[in-house]
Image (spheres, rainbow, N blue to C red):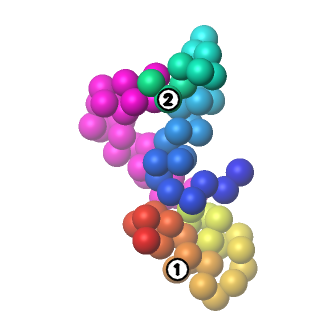
Amino acid sequence: MTRETFEEWLEDYHATNAVGVLDDDMPDAFDHWIATIEPNYLIRLAQRFADEMFRAGLEKGEENGIEEAISRIRGV
């Protein structure tokens, strides 16, 4: 699944790892999780997102693939 923004990627990451959270409670659980996350952990997640977006740009095989990945990382 290709995520367009870091926030969408975080939502997907949280949904995948939020054990025991009902679908109806997911938005509130995400908001609580993101508000209480350790800054260093958030930095590591941002690096994972950047790596995934960079690889997706390389795999695309187009000249502008890397530029598109960088734009998604920046949220442009």
Q: Which residue is farthest left?
A: 39
- Image x and y of residue 54, in percent: 55, 66
Residue name at image x 54 percent, y 70 percent: 69
Mark number displayed over residue 37: none
> From the viewer's perspective, is 8 left or right of 22?
left
Where, quadrant-wise, is the C terminus in this rendering?
A: bottom left
Q: How many marks?
A: 2
Q: Is residue 5 visible?
A: yes
Which is the main secondary structure of the residues drawn in magenta?
Answer: helix
Q: Secondary structure at mark 2?
A: helix
Q: Is residue 19 visible?
A: no
As measured in the structure, the alpha-carbon distance from the residue carrying label 1 to the one carrying label 2 is 31 Å
Q: Quadrant of residue 34?
A: top left
Mark 2, residues whose alpha carbon is within 10 Å: few (<14), some, or many (≥20)? some
- What residue is shown with label 2? 27
Residue name at image x 69 percent, y 84 percent: 62
**Mark 1 vs mark 2: in front:** 2
Residue name at image x 49 percent, y 42 percent: 10
> From the viewer's perspective, is 9 left or right of 60?
left
- Image x and y of residue 22, in percent: 61, 16
- What residue is shown with label 1? 67
User: Within the magenta stretch, is there residue 73?
Assistant: no
Answer with mark 1 or mark 2, whichever residue precedes in sequence: 2
Three-letter code, disc 2: Pro
Mark 1, residues whose alpha carbon is within 10 Å: few (<14), some, or many (≥20)? some
Choose between 4 and 23: the one closer to the eye.
Answer: 23
The stretch in magenta equals: 29-52
Q: Which residue is farthest bottom?
A: 63
- Image x and y of residue 66, in percent: 56, 77
Q: Secondary structure at mark 1?
A: helix
- Image x and y of residue 1, in percent: 71, 51
User: Within the magenta stretch, is there residue 51?
Assistant: yes
